[in-house]
Image (tube, rainbow, N blue to C red):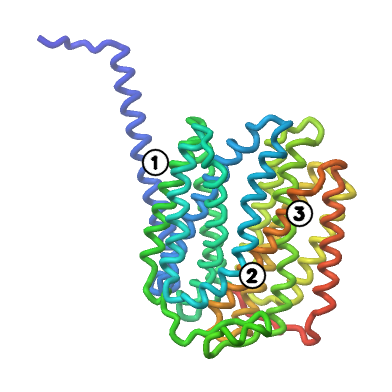
């Protein structure tokens, strides 16, 4: 015979269970609603029919996975390392990461030009390689295996290669009446959303251990691999394409229909190397600087979060600004970005402190985004359509290499005195800006439509 009365504890437990169940159902409904809205936005204005939406979804998983890997490696290889050992171990790790890419990067663009019919598989390979390596890393961070540094090296090099292969695919997926700037803006925005969504999840997973963050990243890269293979088949088509020739000696190896790089594109590309170099330099130099020489009573973790957060905010504002501007003059924009970068580095050098470094990160992130969109606009206007895939692959390869050089200089730069690094950055940017501006084409580019 059952007892008609229910113990108070059991009643409370039932109510808690029902409450948690209701919260889970509400969260699930909100998540499904958010995914539907995101999918609808990605497929708007013909992006669904052209296949651009699939690339946008793939980029979301890619940046979400990269964010998870960065959080795991930062906790494993940086902040948990004793202060006296941090510089040597992190320098070794970053040096191993960058030197091979500095050698490989100049080969990626020509390789894609020769084997353009396999772009889906090239993109998918960069995802699958990272999925495998982060699974290896998940075990290595627990056992402190010798595979830790080589696997981390492979993950970051594959991430750089992805940027080049993706850039070559975008021109093939443009909807009707869609600009490359607008398409790249949507792709960039999906990456920002991917980081914003993934970083908190990775942070929670890190409470259980860095290996769980990497296992979460493994799932994201597997999803990205599937998304890459599901890209439309025309991504692989190289019919009618030619090469963008950056140097005079490239003609003998070029495909039929290839063209020399137009002066306006060459100028925009050279100008973009300055902000990209500064980005690599600041990330690597400030990682050491703030770790070993924190400012005031601020902890290294908080200082790093402030600078990185400011740079991410600047990049986000740059994406928003470029998508909202109806007309811009690319040559004027990239010139202004160079001057602004020099000015903000000088400001950081003179007024070295938390606010100055936050402003430096903000302006650097904003300038990098605006300069890149100006380069995209110049390529769309001045480069024939048949060569645009090659143009994006080769320009992104050049920019990746500029980032690598800046990062490597940031690694080897002495940390004491604190202002020395920013002084070197100022001198390098002034010299590069003078070189770029002196070689500016006499006739500036006409205004380019980049908005809706």
Residue displayed at 78% across by 87% down: 443
Residue displayed at 74% across by 58% down: 278
- Nearer to us in this view, 186 or 95: 95
Residue 27 shows which numbered tag? 1
> In the rendered image, which quarter is residue 322 located in?
bottom right
| Up-down relation of residue 13 to residue 449 (above or below) | above
Residue displayed at 68% across by 66% down: 370
> In the rendered image, which quarter is residue 291 located in?
top right
Task: Check if mark 1's residue and mark 2's residue have beta carbons within 8 Å.
Answer: no
x%, y% of residue 6? 24, 12
Q: Is mark 2 on a helix, strand or loop?
A: helix
Residue displayed at 73% across by 31% down: 84
Disc 3 versus disc 1: distance between alpha carbons? 46 Å
x%, y% of residue 169? 48, 72
Choose the circle earlier in sequence order: 2 or 3: 2
| Up-down relation of residue 177 to residue 372 (above or below) | below
Residue 256 shows which numbered tag? none
Circle 2 residue:
373
Disc 1 versus disc 2: distance between alpha carbons? 37 Å
Taking the image as shown, residue 330 lies to the left or right of residue 376, namely right
Give the class, few, some or many, for how many residues have Cα within 10 Å of label 3's Cα (few <14, many ≥20).
Answer: some
| Up-down relation of residue 216 to residue 221 (above or below) | above
> In the rendered image, which quarter is residue 24 located in?
top left
Circle 3 residue:
409
Choose the circle earlier in sequence order: 1 or 2: 1
Give the class, few, some or many, for how many residues have Cα within 10 Å of label 2's Cα (few <14, many ≥20).
Answer: many
Observer-side mark, 3 or 1, equals: 3
x%, y% of residue 264? 71, 82
Disc 2 versus disc 3: distance between alpha carbons? 26 Å
Task: Check if mark 2's residue and mark 3's residue have beta carbons within 8 Å.
Answer: no
**Quadrant position of the N terminus in the picture:** top left
Work out which residue is located at the far left of the displayed protein and give it. Answer: 1
């Amino acid at each position: 015979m059952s007892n008609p009365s229910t113990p108070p504890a059991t009643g409370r437990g039932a109510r808690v269970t029902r409450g948690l169940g209701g919260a889970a159902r509400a969260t699930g409904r909100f998540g499904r609603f958010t995914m539907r809205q995101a999918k609808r936005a990605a497929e708007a204005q013909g992006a669904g029919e052209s296949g651009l939406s699939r690339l946008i979804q793939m980029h979301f998983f890619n940046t979400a996975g990269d964010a998870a890997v960065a959080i795991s490696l930062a906790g494993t290889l940086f902040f948990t390392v004793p202060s006296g050992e941090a510089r040597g171990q992190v320098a070794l790790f970053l040096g191993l990461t960058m030197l091979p890419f500095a050698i490989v990067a100049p080969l990626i663009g020509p390789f894609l030009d020769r084997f353009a019919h396999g772009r889906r598989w090239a993109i998918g390979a960069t995802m699958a390689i990272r999925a495998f390596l982060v699974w290896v890393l998940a075990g290595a961070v627990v056992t402190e295996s010798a595979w830790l540094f080589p696997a981390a090296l492979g993950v970051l090099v594959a991430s750089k290669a992805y940027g080049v292969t993706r850039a070559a695919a975008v021109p093939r997926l443009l909807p009707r009446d869609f600009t490359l700037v607008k398409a790249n803006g949507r792709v960039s925005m999906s990456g920002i959303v991917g980081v914003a969504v993934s970083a908190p999840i990775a942070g929670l997973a890190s409470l259980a251990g860095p290996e769980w963050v990497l296992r979460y990243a493994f799932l994201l890269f597997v999803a990205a691999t599937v998304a890459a293979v599901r890209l439309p088949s025309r991504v692989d088509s190289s019919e009618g394409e030619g090469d963008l020739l950056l140097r005079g000696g490239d003609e003998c190896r070029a495909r039929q229909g290839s063209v020399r790089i137009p002066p306006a594109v060459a100028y925009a590309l050279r100008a973009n190397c300055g902000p990209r170099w500064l980005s690599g330099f600041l990330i690597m130099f400030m990682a050491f600087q703030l770790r070993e020489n924190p400012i005031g009573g601020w902890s290294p973790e908080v200082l790093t979060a402030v600078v990185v957060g400011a740079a991410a905010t600047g990049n986000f504002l740059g994406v928003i600004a470029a998508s909202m501007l109806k007309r811009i003059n690319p040559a004027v924009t990239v010139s202004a970005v160079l001057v602004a970068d020099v000015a903000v580095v000088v400001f950081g050098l003179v007024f070295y402190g938390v606010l100055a470094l936050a402003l430096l990160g903000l302006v650097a992130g904003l300038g990098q985004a605006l300069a890149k969109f100006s380069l995209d606009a110049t390529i769309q206007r001045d480069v024939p359509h048949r060569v645009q895939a090659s143009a994006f692959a080769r320009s992104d390869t050049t920019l990746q290499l500029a980032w690598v050089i800046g990062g490597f200089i940031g690694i080897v730069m002495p940390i004491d005195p604190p202002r020395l690094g920013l002084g070197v950055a100022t001198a390098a940017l002034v010299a590069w800006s003078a070189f770029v501006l002196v070689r500016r084409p006499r006739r500036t580019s006409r205004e380019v439509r980049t908005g809706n």
